[in-house]
């Protein structure tokens, strides 16, 4: 698994040779709240990445992503509209990498390989 960090907006998800590549996981919690001028990137929305890999090969078995919202140095589940926004953004930017993202009824995003 390869994890990029420090992006503060959705970045692509890819499976390369069976291994997970996350181009930017961002910060789960940070102290950048309140910085203006970048609202279109929705920096308050975050994803919790829950990856399962096979023990013997390290190949990706499953990836679930939970949309969260940061406020006052705390995380809470994103509301439905914000989760849908995050899912649509992730689908759009991950598609060129051959990744398909679907949304479960509870708002969890699932990588379909």
Image (tube, helix red, strand yellow):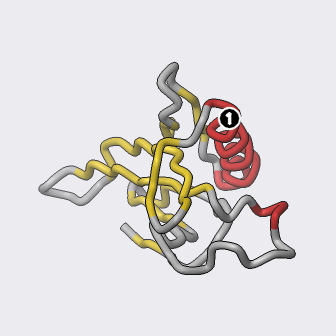
Question: Residue at left 81%, top 64%?
Answer: 39
Q: Is residue 8 above or below residue 63?
A: below
Identify the residue position indicated by label 1 in the image.
84
- The answer to which image quadrant residue 34 occupies is bottom right
* Left or right of residue 31, residue 50 in this image: left
Q: Residue at x 60, y 46 (%)?
A: 99
Residue at the outermost top position: 105
68 in relation to 26, above or below = above
- Label 1's element? helix
Camera-side residue of 14 and 28 = 28
Tell me where residue 79 sits by quadrant.
top right
Q: Residue at x 64, y 71 (%)?
A: 8
Q: Quadrant of the N terminus?
A: bottom left
Q: Residue furthest front?
A: 72
Query: Residue 93 location in percent, x, y?
Result: 73, 54
Residue 37 or residue 87, whichever sits in front? 37
69 vs 110: above or below: below
Q: Position of residue 82 (x, y in %)?
A: 67, 41
39 displayed left or right of 90: right
The residue at the point 46 percent across, 48 percent down is 76
| Nearest to the observer: residue 75 or residue 85 | 75
Q: How many numbered discs?
A: 1
| Label 1 Cα crowd, 10 Å radius (few <14 / some 14-19 / many 20+) | some
Q: Nearer the viewer, residue 84 or 18?
A: 84
Drawn side of residue 26 relative to residue 49, left or right:
right
x, y percentage for residue 23?
Answer: 57, 69
């Amino acid at each position: 698994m390869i994890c990029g960090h420090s992006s503060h907006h959705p970045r692509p998800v890819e499976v390369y040779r069976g291994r997970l590549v996350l181009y930017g996981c961002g910060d789960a919690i940070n102290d950048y709240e309140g910085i203006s001028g970048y609202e279109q990137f929705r920096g308050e929305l975050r994803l919790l990445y829950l990856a399962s890999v096979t023990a013997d090969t390290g190949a990706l078995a499953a990836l679930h992503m939970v949309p969260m919202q940061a406020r006052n140095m705390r995380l809470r589940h994103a509301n439905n509209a914000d989760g849908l926004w995050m899912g649509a953004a992730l689908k759009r930017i991950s598609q060129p990498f051959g990744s398909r993202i679907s949304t479960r009824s509870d708002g969890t995003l699932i990588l379909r390989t």
